[in-house]
Amino acid sequence: MCRVTAPSSRERRAGDACPGVSRPFVAVDGSIVRLRPAGQPVRIEVLSDLMDVIAGQQDPAIQLTSRGALQLRGLPDPLTPRIRDAIRATGLVPSATHELVRNIVASPLSGLDGAGHCDLRPVTRALDAALRTDPDLSRLGGRFLLVLDDGRGDVVGESFDLGLFATGPARCVVLAGGIDRGWEVPLAAAVPRLVALARQFVQAASGDESVWHVSELAVPLGPEPTAELDLPRQPERPLGAVGDHAVVAVPLGLLRPDHVAALAGVTDRVLVTPWRSLVIEKAAAALPELEAAGLVTHAGSPWTRLHACTGLPGCARSALDTRALARDLAPVLPGGHLPVHVSGCERRCGTPATAYVDVVAPRSAEQALSTIAEQESSWT
Ligand code: SF4
């Protein structure tokens, strides 16, 4: 039931198609553009401006991705100059040359709740700036991922290329290609070390288009690893009040205009997590308003475990509107402990990396319910 799919050799031959405003991906419902906040907060004004870009669509929504990025789809192909300019005016594409490589995921509550060893927000900003100003690193590729974990263990479990794991207030282990290859360094030295490793990767992978990730290099990056990590158990994903702060999940990862309007009433910025939720500083008292707008504030909601691939109308492979089916399922979803993923076809895009209930191309909500009951019972 748990399936993690590597890109097929055909996909590799087709190359890295991760979209951006400089290189939209064209799907059956139009162009897709992905915008990368690089682990940093996004102003609500920016979300409103993006909503204006897609305001003419039938069901406008900003998609949140599993790397904490924002995605617009259903845009014209090619993008009109007006749309391109409107997207660039948001400031979410601070470098035309490095747009696709700013893939940074950092512990979303770092510096806010005191749970990690340190506040990684300055490190995140410094890493983004260092990536953007190194001309060679524009060749990293859209699939290359950097993770910064403040020691709580929430993002180091992602499938990453380079990263750091804080081991104290001023120390960390820099990682390359996984958690078993690392070097302990002062936190202040982590960004230069990550940049040096990224440059080394670019050189080592140069000329071989089949290498997208550090783990795929014939010769491992860096010297012999010197650090062994003692990882904590992966913490529960936060939801609701975290001290004074709020974390809200976004059903199906689709941020709608009414969500943005409600957010505008309580904050001027949010941080997008890799789990399709938002961290909102000092907003714990506003959780009732956010919940009234359809954002998820408590673990009992079916939306904490119900997911769907793109499906129709965005994906030609699908025989059904997977998200409409998920919306039909939500009010009747029985209790259970596993995530439920509705896929429109056997490719199962976006499935969780952990065990999950696998609902593929159901003919109806009733059939989906019976699949869920059958698979849940086999796990109990
Ligand atoms: S799982 Fe199939 S239907 Fe769903 S988005 Fe992927 S290719 Fe399309």
Image: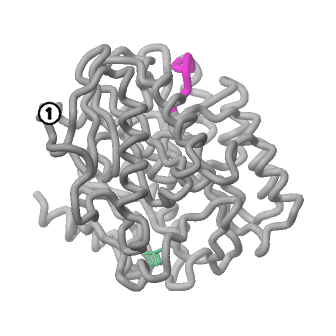
Residue 123 spot, x, y in % from top left: 46, 26
Q: Which residue is mark 1?
A: 227
Residue 106 spot, x, y in % from top left: 42, 35
Disc 1 crowd, CA 10 A, few/some/many (<14, 14-19, 20+): some
Question: Which residue corresponds to the image point at 81% horizontal and 44% vertical from the top-left?
Answer: 89
Residue 237 spot, x, y in % from top left: 34, 36
On whether residue 197 falls in the magenta region, the answer is: no
Q: Quadrant of residue 34?
A: bottom right
Q: Is residue 91 above or below residue 264?
A: below
Question: Which residue corresponds to the image point at 41% horizontal and 78% vertical from the top-left?
Answer: 12
Farthest right residue in view: 82
On whether residue 281 falls in the magenta region, the answer is: yes
Q: Decide if residue 327 is on the left or right side of residue 61.
A: left
- In this view of the protein, can residue 39 be seen by the observer? yes
| Image quarter (top left, top right, bottom left or bottom right) of the N terminus | bottom left
Question: Which residue corresponds to the image point at 42% horizontal and 49% vertical from the top-left?
Answer: 199
Question: Which residue corresponds to the image point at 41% horizontal and 70% vertical from the top-left?
Answer: 349
| Image quarter (top left, top right, bottom left or bottom right) of the C terminus | bottom left
The magenta stretch is 279-284
**In the foreground, 28 or 142:** 142
Residue 306 spot, x, y in % from top left: 40, 56
Q: Secondary structure at mark 1?
A: loop
**In the foreground, 343 or 72:** 72
Identify which amino acid the numbered label 1 is placed on.
Answer: Ala
